[in-house]
Image: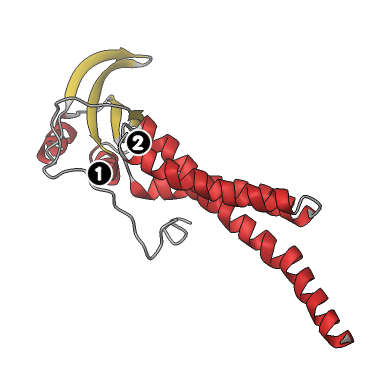
Amino acid sequence: MVCLMWELSVSSDLFAWVILPLLIFSARICDVSLGTLRVIFISRGFKKIAPFIGFFEVIIWLVAIGQVMQNIGNFASYIAYGGGFATGTYVGMAVEERLSLGNVVIRVITQKDAAPLEQALREMDLGVTATDAEGATGPVRILLSVCRRQDLPQVLSCINQYQPGAFFTVEEVKMVKEGIFPSGRESIRINWRDPLGFFRKGK
């Protein structure tokens, strides 16, 4: 009888101080990650998928907060709740970065001959707007182009090839109407073997 009570006590402590905090931690990672993605999807104009994500986000949150309130004297649950929130924020941003959603505008300013770069970008089926301007140290050429975010690595590689050392900026674009883009619809792409990019080159 004593052994049985001791085993029950150990099992209860194990659940309260290890298993339950881990469950709360995992639930918070899920709901905060979904919340981060939901906000990003809304800002990028993906209005149809955002409510679907929000549905699961709030259900998971209710389960997590319910367990915390039922075990209000368990400080391990508080730590797990906060830790899951912080981790979920990072995971959500990392996943969104890997998804490569939306469009960006690239601005290149160079003092060199920009014709080869203009031609290379147009051969990639990108629209390019070019204009002459006056910089701090003399005449410059400004190139503007909008591309899908998933095509950004190829565009930056092209810039570095034809205009090494050129000044350029990349900015998010909420909405694009008309324009010239590479053929094919935008797709959600993710490397499931390395969804957070831990094994990317340079890391």
Q: Nearer the viewer, residue 78 or 191?
A: 78
What kind of residue is marked 1?
A: Asp
Q: Which residue is mark 2?
A: 165
The coloring applied to the image is secondary structure
| Residue found at x 26% / y 13% | 133
| Residue found at x 53% / y 45% | 32
Taking the image as drawn, is residue 160 in sight? no
Q: Position of residue 199 (x, y in %)?
A: 44, 62
Of the numbered discs 2 and 1, the one sitting upstream in the chain is 1
- The answer to whether residue 70 is left or right of residue 53 is right
| Circle 1 SS class | helix
| Residue found at x 15% / y 35% | 126
Taking the image as drawn, is residue 145 in sight? yes
User: Would you identify the image quadrant in which residue 159 lies?
Assistant: top left
Q: Which residue is mark 1?
A: 151
- The answer to whether residue 1 is left or right of residue 182 is right
What kind of residue is marked 2?
A: Gly
Query: Is 55 placed above or below 71 here?
Result: above
Q: Position of residue 51 (x, y in %)?
A: 38, 38
Q: Position of residue 62 (x, y in %)?
A: 57, 46
Query: Is 4 placed above or below 158 here?
Result: below
Q: Nearer the viewer, residue 151 or 166?
A: 151
Query: Is 108 placed above or below 121 here?
Result: above
Say the numbered circle drawn on residue 182.
none
| Circle 2 SS class | loop
Q: Position of residue 162 (x, y in %)?
A: 23, 39
User: Would you identify the image quadrant in which residue 168 lies?
Assistant: top left
| Residue found at x 48% / y 56% | 203
Q: Residues within 10 Å of mark 2 (few under 14, many from 20)?
A: few
Q: What is the residue that sits farthest to the top in this orientation?
A: 134
Q: What is the residue that sits farthest to the front in this orientation?
A: 1
Please identify, in this view, whether the residue under mark 2 or under mark 1 is nearer the observer: 1
